[in-house]
Each structure stands twice: as structure tokens, then as C-alpha cells.
Amino acid sequence: MSTVEKALEFENRKFSFKTTSDRILAAREAKDLILEVNELYKEKKDSKLMDLMKRLTVIKQKIEKRLKGRPLTATS
């Protein structure tokens, strides 16, 4: 399976994380895929690869936001 196919499969996957470790693994997988697609982009300079990296980055940011949780509200 090529890197692009793996990235597209990851992008279309249904995300329902039961545990924190599931979220951590998904964030790491997203990061690895982004880096692999970036290597391809460096060679080919295809705008479709850049768009794919951007979409994967958005997914990764959502996962990481969920990992960090809500900030505590300041009480005065």
C-alpha cells in the first residue's frame, strides 16, 4: 500500500477513540503520514499532495486538542 493510499485511508477512517492511548497512537500515525507525504511532495511538487498534508494536519490538530483537554477556568 502506498503512502498516499495509507493517508487517504487514515483520512476517511471513522474516529471514535475509547482511550487516551488510542488518541495518542492516532496523533502519532497522523504525524508519520504527514512526514511521509511531505517527502513525496519535495520530489514531485504536486499541489494535491500539499492539500492532503493540510487535511491530515487538521485531523491531527483536532486529535491533539482533544488530548490536551479543556483549560481550567480562572477563578478570581
Image (cartoon, rainbow, N blue to C red):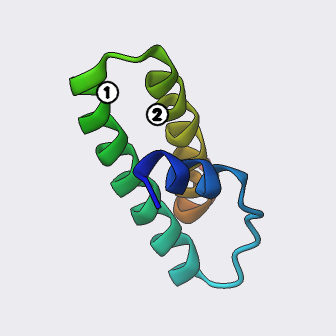
The Cα atoms of the two marked residues, 2 and 1, are separated by 9 Å
Identify the element where label 2 is drawn: helix
Q: Residue at x 57, y 79 (%)?
A: 22
Q: Residue at x 64, y 50 (%)?
A: 11
When the figure is inspected, residue 57 is found, relative to residue 1, above or below; the finding is above
Q: Residue at x 44, y 23 (%)?
A: 50
Q: Are marks 2 and 1 in contact (CB under 8 Å)?
A: yes
Q: Tell whether 36 sits left or right of 29.
A: left
Q: Could you classify mark 1 by the number of other residues whose Cα lies within 10 Å: few (under 14), some (14-19), or many (20 or more)? A: some
When the figure is inspected, residue 18 is found, relative to residue 15, above or below; the finding is below
Q: Which mark is residue 53?
A: 2
Amino acid type for the residue under numbered disc 2 = Met
Amino acid type for the residue under numbered disc 1 = Tyr
Q: Could you classify mark 2 by the number of other residues whose Cα lies within 10 Å: few (under 14), some (14-19), or many (20 or more)? A: many
Q: Position of residue 61 (x, y in %)?
A: 53, 45
In the picture of the structure, the residue carrying the numbered disc 1 is 41
Q: Position of residue 18 (x, y in %)?
A: 71, 83
Q: Tell whether 58 sits left or right of 46.
A: right
Nearer the N terminus, badge 2 or badge 1?
1
Q: Residue at x 32, y 16 (%)?
A: 45
Residue 43: image quadrant is top left
Residue 70: image quadrant is bottom right
